Structures are given as C-alpha cells and as structure tokens.
Image (tube, rainbow, N blue to C red):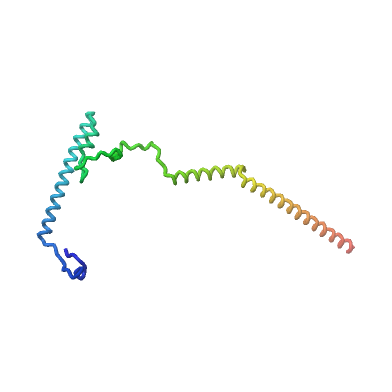
Amino acid sequence: MPKGGKKGGHKGRMRTYTSPEEIDAQMKAEKERKKQEQEEEEGAAQNDTAEEKLQESGSEDSDDEDSQRKRAGVEGLIEIENPNRVAQKSKKVTQIELDEPKQLSRREREEIEKQKAKERYMKMHLAGKTDQAKADLARLAIIRKQREEAAKKKEEERKAKEAAAAAARGINSLSLK
C-alpha cells in the first residue's frame, strides 16, 4: 500500500510500500487472533451451560461471578475500593419489569400538566364559568337583542310600506271612478 499523497508527501519524502512478507505476517497474526477469539467464545459457551446447571440445582453465587469476571486493562492490576462506584449489572429480559411506571422528564411532565390545564379551562369555558365565557355570553345576548330589534324595525317598515302602497292604490282607484 502506498503511503502519502499524489505528489509524494511532505518535504519531498518518497512513498513507502508494504512488502509481501509483511502482508503475510499480518494475515497470519489476524488468523491467530480470530482462532483465539473463537476458542474463548466456545469456552464461554461451555461455562454458561455449566452455570445454568448450577443455577438449576439451587446454588447462586452472584458475588463470586462478579469477582471472577475478566477484568480488562488496568482494572485487573489495581484493586479499587471506591464506595461510590456502582458496578453495572446487566439485566436479562425476564428480569425487566414492564409494570413499573416510566419516569417522565421535567419537560414531559410540564407538557402533560399544560394539556390537562387547557382541558380543564375548556370544560369550564363551555360551562360558562370563566370570566371570558361570561363576557362572551353577555356580548352574544346584546347582539341577539340588537338583531331582534333590527328585525322588528324592518318588519314595521315593510308593513308601513305595504300600507302606504295600499293607500296609494286606494286613492288611485277612487280617483279613477
């Protein structure tokens, strides 16, 4: 594999290429690593079946399992006595309880409270108990009265017109005779 850019790299360095021997060595190391991982997985699967048999017989040693688990990096070399450190325990699907109530965030709680308050207000508004509803109902009553008065006035004007028209016809009919 060539290293560097199109023009050879910084400050005139030459491109370097990986030799076929190095590639073969890398491939062998990769194969060995995969074999070891497979062997560890097979060993872990055998250990799991042995643990299941022990659990079926009734003996449970969860503290021993935690202390015997494989530690990675510096953790295996140094014993840590931190009282605030909480060991992460993985839960199995059968252990997870779906019945326990979900903890809501502050925003979610506030949003739910806001919706409930809005619904309460709308109920009271429809019942006519809020100040705004009372003002609306008063305004509607005034408008109804105005419309009724306007309708009565219009009706009276129409009747007066008809009477005037009838009177004018009566005079015309008398003058023709």
Which residue is nearer to you in this view: 76 or 38?
76
Q: Is residue 13 left or right of residue 122?
A: left
**Where residue 53 sits: x, y (%)?**
20, 32
Relative to 98, is 19 above or below? below
Residue 162, quarter of the rendered image: bottom right
In which quadrant is the C terminus drawn?
A: bottom right
Please report the residue visible at 25 percent of the width from the left and 38 percent of the height from the top: 81
**Where residue 161 sits: x, y (%)?**
80, 58
In which quadrant is the N terminus drawn?
A: bottom left
Q: Is residue 54 left or right of residue 164?
A: left
**Where residue 87 sits: x, y (%)?**
28, 39
How many numbered circles are shown? 0
Relative to 123, is 157 above or below? below
Residue 68 visible in the current orientation: yes
Please report the residue visible at 14 percent of the width from the left and 64 percent of the height from the top: 17
Please report the residue visible at 14 percent of the width from the left and 46 percent of the height from the top: 36
Relative to 123, is 15 above or below? below
Relative to 111, is 14 above or below? below
**Where residue 143 sits: x, y (%)?**
69, 51
